[in-house]
Image (cartoon, rainbow, N blue to C red):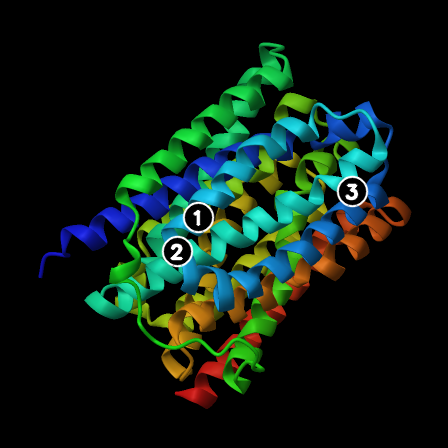
Amino acid sequence: MEIPKIYRNSIISSIQNIYIFLSTLGIYFVYIPWNLERLKLVETDLGLWLFLFGVFNLISNQITGRIIAPNIGSKNIIIIGTIIIAVCPFLLVSVNSYSMFMFIALPFGIAVGFIFPTNQSLISYIESKTNKIYTPLFQAFMAAGTLSGALIAAYVIKKDIDPQITFAVMGVIILISAVAVYFLGLPKVEESKETVDRFKMPEKQILIFGILLMMNFATVGIIVDWSSLWLTKDLMAPLFLGGLVIVFFNSGEIIARLLASFLISRLGEKFVGGYLPIVGALILFVSILTANLYIIVPALVLFGLFTANFMSIVIRQAIKVTKEPISLAVSNLTTLGFSGFIFGPALVGYTAENIGLTFNMYVLCVIWALSAFFLIRIMIKFN
């Protein structure tokens, strides 16, 4: 059965929006070592920034899902968040004071709280209306965004292009994305009419799945936020190669997510979301022991390939068992997930400065393997 045009346009709107946003973010991730050096900051300062980002993102997640989106519509809240996002990366590479650098975590965290859970809620809502799987495709474009950003960063750094010019251009592109959302986004009258309880503890099932996302979000930043610093500091790679981890990890993720429907139908969600991530974590752990970049790089591809669909399966499983409205369930899930940014970056920043980032890469492998194991146990219990 062909998907209605209004839903197809909404999917395109969400995909292009998250892709452009994460492309810009992917560029900035590669510039993190440069920006820390420019501002004379250390790993704990970056950890504090990410902590503040996580706090404001958590608050924004809950307010968006419970109050703002039901009142003004998902499309409008995505447009507002996108406009804010357009200027934040530019400001991060332009400000010269510690206090201003930290302050930008406030609007950045709030804007991401507007964009990410709202787009995911729309995708999940369309899945429920059409009985088709779109979450892995949406998340494939998320991975493609950070991959594109890392590749663009390698190019502009190699060409010695001023970072302010790069992020000014990306800011304009992000604003164009907001225009696309305006014309293609799902109208408010077409959204779910389910009543959202404004102040209510999440269901037990949502809490359980949300904790898995929390551990995922708390550690995924090790790859996304810290990998450039890990390569340049611990493995002594040049800055323009700082995005290698993101490039190869996301290459594996994109392949797996584009094949998600096929893999899930043939192997089942338990195998794809549980057993494969355990194997991927083991492969990456062994590769890091070698400290050889030529071994680590292909291991990262396999790690991304085997772990890519963990988050989408957690979300799909949670929505299957919950009685909450989809928008509220996704809001609660992403709030719990992004709360990992509250304690994760602080711990990573401390251990990175005092023990080393390689230690955090080992921890990443252990936590992802344990999370996958617990997902298997939870799926057995609920199914």
Q: Nearer the viewer, mark 3 or mark 2?
A: 2
Query: To which quarter of the image does residue 175 belong?
Result: top left
Q: Is residue 316 left or right of residue 209?
A: left
Q: Which residue is mark 1?
A: 78
Q: Is residue 223 left or right of residue 182?
A: right
Q: Which residue is mark 3?
A: 46
Of the residues under marks 3 and 2, which one precedes in the sequence? 3
Q: Which residue is mark 2?
A: 74
Residue at (40, 84) in percent of width and height: 323
Please say whether residue 279 is visible from this viewpoint: yes
Query: To which quarter of the image does residue 16 belong?
Result: top left
Question: Marks 1 and 2: in contact by CB < 8 Å?
Answer: yes
Residue at (27, 40) in percent of width and height: 183
User: How far, Cα to Cα, is label 2 from label 1?
Assistant: 6 Å
Please say whether residue 234 is visible from this viewpoint: no
Q: Position of residue 317 (x, y in %)?
A: 41, 75
Q: Residues within 10 Å of mark 2 (few under 14, many from 20)?
A: many
Q: Residue furthest front?
A: 71
**For the residue labelled by badge 2, is the local secondary structure a helix, a strand or a loop?**
helix
Q: Residues within 10 Å of mark 1 (few under 14, many from 20)?
A: many
**For the residue labelled by badge 1, is the local secondary structure a helix, a strand or a loop?**
helix
Question: Marks 2 and 3: in contact by CB < 8 Å?
Answer: no
Circle number at residue 252: none
The amino acid type, in three-letter code, at marker 1 is: Ile
- The quadrant of the rendering that contains the N terminus is bottom left
Q: Position of residue 87 (x, y in %)?
A: 58, 31
Q: Position of residue 85 (x, y in %)?
A: 55, 38
